[in-house]
Image (cartoon, grey):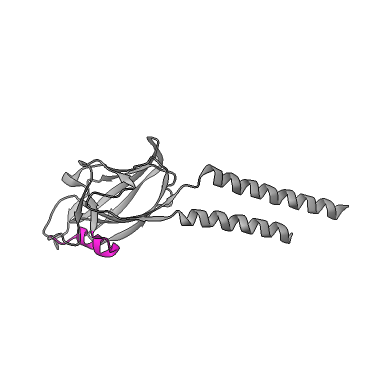
Amino acid sequence: MNRKLGVLSVLLFAFTGTTQAASQTINFEQNGASFFSTIPLEVDYLDGAAYPIPGGYQNVAEATSSQWVAYNPDEYSPSSFTSASGELFNLDSFWLAGAWGNQTLTVTGYANGKQVGDSVPIEVSIAATEYFFPDLRGIDMFTIALGNDYVHDSSVTGDARHWALGSMTISAVPEPATCAMLLAGIGIVGAVTRRQRSKAVV
């Protein structure tokens, strides 16, 4: 029994360590982020920390300690963020704010051109907020779409349905070989258990 628990513990530790190590934070620069490819008409980038008009741009930059933010120029909708290498990823979370007001945005994940799970509606204001997406797993693209309920915040001078996206956390999807290794290890544990039981009966 101790041998079985020992083998299982080692396998689970290795598997967990692999998935945790693959988690990464994506920050934007003047030209975007190398992990994602974006369409210029859909997504642009600005120096949120130095932007002269206060609001969601500055709030997200300050909250994430990353001065560059992504936004939707000309209120483009939906805006898409696609894995540049085509690899699958899990969208764990990102920081987002309405640039100059409140509105409902909808986040949708895709893999190989097909929608993954349900779209996620989120309510944003000019306050920087971190949103989590436990169901957007194994995707190669996500989109952000505008709603029709924008309300301008009177505390800021700008006025448009722009959103401000700061840093995000993504994690890699475990490779099939890694999953196969874990399943094989569990099979070995089962075999050891059956053998021990057989010896006990004899």
Q: Nearer the viewer, residue 154 or 87?
A: 87
Residue 173 x, y percent position in the rendering: 46, 47
Q: Nearer the viewer, residue 4 or 132?
A: 4
Q: Which residue occupies 52% across, 57% down?
A: 17
Which residue is the extreme one toward the top?
113
Q: Which residues are magenta?
A: 53-67
Q: Nearer the viewer, residue 39 or 119?
A: 39
The vertical placement of 85 against 162, above or below, is above
Residue 37 located left or right of residue 87: left
Q: Which residue occupies 30% across, 55% down?
A: 27
The vertical placement of 116 against 65, above or below, is above
The quarter in which the N terminus is drawn is: bottom right
Residue 97 located left or right of residue 24: left
Locate residue 50: give its quadrant. Answer: bottom left
Residue 60 x, y percent position in the rendering: 25, 60
Residue 199 x, y percent position in the rendering: 84, 53
Q: Nearer the viewer, residue 31 or 125?
A: 31
Locate residue 53: give its quadrant. Answer: bottom left
Residue 140 located left or right of residue 75: right
Q: How many marks?
A: 0
Magenta stretch, overall SS:
helix
Q: Which residue occupies 12% across, 56% down?
A: 158
Queried whether the magenta region covers residue 90, the answer comes back as: no
